[in-house]
Image (spheres, helix red, strand yellow):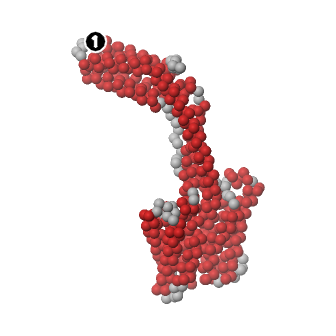
């Protein structure tokens, strides 16, 4: 998947993206409006909701219009839509602050900060979601292909005799119940075999004859249900961390960008320094945990990639929280208390985003290659199996033509002749006995064919 395919695809303007941004954007607004003298406590929440609705409407509408002209929206176009959404978010925030609280709207500052945050956060998040969905499809396709290979490989290793025996069993097991039902019906009506009953039996035998032909064309052994086409969320994320230090660097940059501007504006430079130090320390932990596990227990990292990533993120959040509340860089503790929730959410989303951006992109590229190899192998094995089955099916058709299909055809002719003429009870009983003898013979022939007694032609 290319960058253009990811950023210009359906996830560039998707409602899931807007839902994902709602919690952190709301916390940013609450933090930013802490010093705005709104007359009521709920005005920051109202401002956050209004900003999100306007931004969401612009992104959804812009994306819909762009897709009318492009299957894949060009990256500059989608970046312009996001930039417009960020600008309008800052404009709405400043307007509400000015009209309700009577303060300077600070349009330039608000629009600038939201634009920087959008540039740093939106493209990686869209790319990560696209790679994650791609991962689910690829893993699902791999599961289905491996399932099909597991089913086809035993057939490829089977001999002609084994394939022949499988076909014989499949046909015999399909036809025997219908034969038994026909014999029971004929036994029940042998004393009153009128034209209508004869015609009905003739039709049922004709259907049996047709079923025999169809089974020879499509006989197969039953198989288990195939796996789903799309992998589960957990299975898609089950990949070991890669490039832990690069991930840690990107997490630090994204989280600092999200938090530091507003903290500096509201609480001052000491609080901003505290945020930077706490975020860097958390990122070092996020990078160090998988890097250490990779050195000490590489097998454990491969087997427990999700758990390692989760533990690293939780430890990073703990370290950042501890430093924000206890470092003493900013002597006012409540500044840290207000900043910690946004910092924790930023670290969590950034870790998940860059894990998907780096790790899943790499894994998807490898899985694409593996899928191509497996699909080529599956195509080759299927062609060989189809040739073998077709050859054995023709041989079985020749074997069944006389004893099974021939006897059934003879019964149909006799019943049709009886239905078309005037026959007394003695002739009806004779016909019934004759047809029953033929059907019993067909049952015996099917049993012999299933047991492999009949010889196929070379």
Residue at screen point 68% across, 75% down = 276
In terms of image quadrants, where is residue 305?
bottom right
Q: Which residue is mark 1?
A: 427
> Where residue 30 sits: x, y (%)?
55, 77
Residue at screen point 63% across, 81% down = 264
* Residue 118 is at least partly visible in this image: yes
State the residue in front, 242 or 179: 242
Could you tell whether 413 is left or right of 245 in the image? left
> Where residue 313 sits: x, y (%)?
66, 64
In terms of image quadrants, where is residue 381?
top right
> Where residue 94 sits: x, y (%)?
50, 82
Residue at screen point 26% across, 23% down = 196
Considering the numbered disc 1 on the image, is that residue within a helix, a strand or a loop?
A: helix
Residue at screen point 52% across, 63% down = 8
> Where residue 104 sits: x, y (%)?
52, 88
Could you tell whether 290 is left or right of 343 in the image? right
Quadrant where the N terminus is found in the figure: bottom right
Residue at the outermost right position: 296
Q: How many marks?
A: 1
Asked if residue 340 is positioned above or below residue 430 in the image, the reply reads below
* Residue 16 is at least partly visible in this image: no
Residue at the outermost left position: 422
Answer few, some or many: residues within 10 Å of disc 1's Cα (few below 14, many 20 plus, some between 14 and 19): few
State the residue in front, 434 or 3: 3
């Amino acid at each position: 998947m290319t960058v253009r395919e990811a950023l210009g695809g359906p996830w560039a303007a998707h409602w899931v993206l807007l839902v994902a941004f709602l919690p952190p954007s709301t916390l940013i607004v609450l933090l930013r409006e802490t010093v705005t003298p709104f007359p009521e406590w709920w005005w920051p929440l109202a401002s956050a909701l209004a900003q999100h609705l306007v931004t969401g409407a612009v992104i959804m509408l812009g994306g819909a219009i762009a897709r009318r002209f492009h299957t894949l929206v060009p990256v500059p176009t989608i970046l312009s839509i996001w930039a417009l959404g960020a600008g309008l978010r800052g404009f709405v925030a400043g307007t509400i602050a000015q009209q309700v609280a009577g303060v300077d709207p600070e349009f330039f500052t608000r629009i600038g900060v939201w634009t920087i945050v959008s540039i740093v956060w939106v493209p990686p998040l869209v790319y990560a979601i696209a790679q994650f969905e791609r991962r689910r499809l690829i893993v699902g396709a791999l599961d289905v292909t491996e399932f099909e290979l597991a089913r086809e490989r035993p057939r490829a290793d089977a001999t002609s005799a084994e394939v022949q025996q499988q076909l014989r069993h499949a046909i015999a097991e399909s036809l025997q119940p219908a034969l038994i039902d026909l014999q029971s019906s004929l036994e029940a009506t042998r004393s009153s075999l009128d034209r209508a009953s004869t015609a009905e039996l003739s039709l049922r035998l004709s259907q049996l004859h047709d079923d025999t032909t169809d089974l020879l064309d499509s006989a197969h052994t039953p198989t288990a249900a195939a796996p789903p086409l799309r992998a589960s969320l957990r299975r898609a994320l089950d990949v070991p961390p890669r490039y832990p230090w690069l991930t840690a660097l990107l997490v630090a940059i994204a989280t600092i960008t999200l938090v530091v501007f507003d903290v500096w504006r509201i609480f001052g430079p000491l609080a901003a320094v505290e945020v930077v130090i706490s975020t860097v320390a958390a990122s070092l932990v996020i990078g160090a945990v998988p890097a250490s596990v990779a050195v000490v227990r590489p097998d454990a990292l491969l087997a427990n990639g999700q758990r390692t990533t989760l533990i690293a993120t939780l430890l990073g959040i703990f370290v950042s929280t501890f430093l924000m509340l206890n470092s003493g860089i900013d002597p006012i503790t409540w500044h840290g208390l207000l900043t910690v929730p946004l910092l924790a959410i930023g670290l969590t989303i950034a870790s998940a985003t860059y894990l998907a951006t780096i790790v899943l992109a790499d894994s998807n590229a490898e899985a694409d290659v593996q899928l191509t190899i497996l699909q080529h192998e599956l195509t080759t094995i299927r062609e060989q199996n189809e040739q073998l089955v077709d050859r054995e099916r023709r041989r079985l058709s020749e074997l069944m033509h006389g004893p099974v299909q021939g006897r059934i055809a003879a019964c149909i002719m006799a019943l049709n002749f009886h239905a078309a003429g005037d026959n007394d009870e003695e002739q009806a009983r004779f016909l019934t006995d004759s047809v029953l003898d033929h059907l019993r013979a067909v049952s015996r022939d099917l049993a012999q064919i299933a047991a492999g007694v009949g010889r196929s032609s070379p």
